[in-house]
Image (cartoon, rainbow, N blue to C red):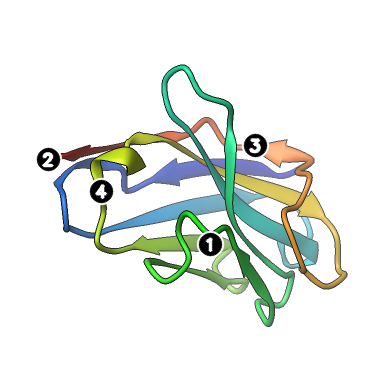
């Protein structure tokens, strides 16, 4: 079983940047596709981006495409989400997620595991 802990959230002004981190513990992290989701108050959880188990493939939702970059370091069991040009509508709780899958990433994934989330607040 994989345990996921997010960090790096906080308060930032519109136009600013944040780098979210996700630390994973448990066996075979490198066999998992990883993703980031977010949930704003009163809204459904939204898929943002996924990365394949080796990091060679990524898939971005339109809402963050061009403003965000996902990466992973399998040697350190870490996943990162660099977010730039943040907007007030990016305010949400951001979740790291994992799916046991060594296949390609060509769209949103259905996670097996979730972190508890980290809050991102973007002020105007």
Residue 124: which numbered mark, if any? 2
Of residues 46 and 3, the one drawn nearer to the viewer in this rendering:
46
Q: Quadrant of the C terminus?
A: top left
The answer to which quarter of the image holds residue 31 is bottom right
| Disc 4 target residue | 87
The answer to which quarter of the image holds residue 119 is top left
Structural distance between the alpha carbons of marks 4 and 2: 8 Å
Circle nearer the viewer, 4 or 3:
4
Look at the numbered disc 3 and give the secondary structure of its residue.
strand
Structural distance between the alpha carbons of marks 1 and 4: 25 Å
Earlier along the polypeptide chain: callout 1 or callout 2? 1
Q: Quadrant of the N terminus?
A: top right
Circle nearer the viewer, 1 or 2:
2
Structural distance between the alpha carbons of marks 2 and 3: 30 Å
Look at the numbered disc 1 and give the secondary structure of its residue.
strand
Name the spot of residue 82 as percent of width and height, x first.
37, 64
Residue furthest top in the image: 42
Q: Residue at x 52, y 52 (%)?
A: 23
Position of 78 with respect to 25 (left or right) is left
| Disc 3 target residue | 114
Structural distance between the alpha carbons of marks 1 and 2: 31 Å
| Disc 1 target residue | 78
Residue furthest front in the image: 62
């Amino acid at each position: 079983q994989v345990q996921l802990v997010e960090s790096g959230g906080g308060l930032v002004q519109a136009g600013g940047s944040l780098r979210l981190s996700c630390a994973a513990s448990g066996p075979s992290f490198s066999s998992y596709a990883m993703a980031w989701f977010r949930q704003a108050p009163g809204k459904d959880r939204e898929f943002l981006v996924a990365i394949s188990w080796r990091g060679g493939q990524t898939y971005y939702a339109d809402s963050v495409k061009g403003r965000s970059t996902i990466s992973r370091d399998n040697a350190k069991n870490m996943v990162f989400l660099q977010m730039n040009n943040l907007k007030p509508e990016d305010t949400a709780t951001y979740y790291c997620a994992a799916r046991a899958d060594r296949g390609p990433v060509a769209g949103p994934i259905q996670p097996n595991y979730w972190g508890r989330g980290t809050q991102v607040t973007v002020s105007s």
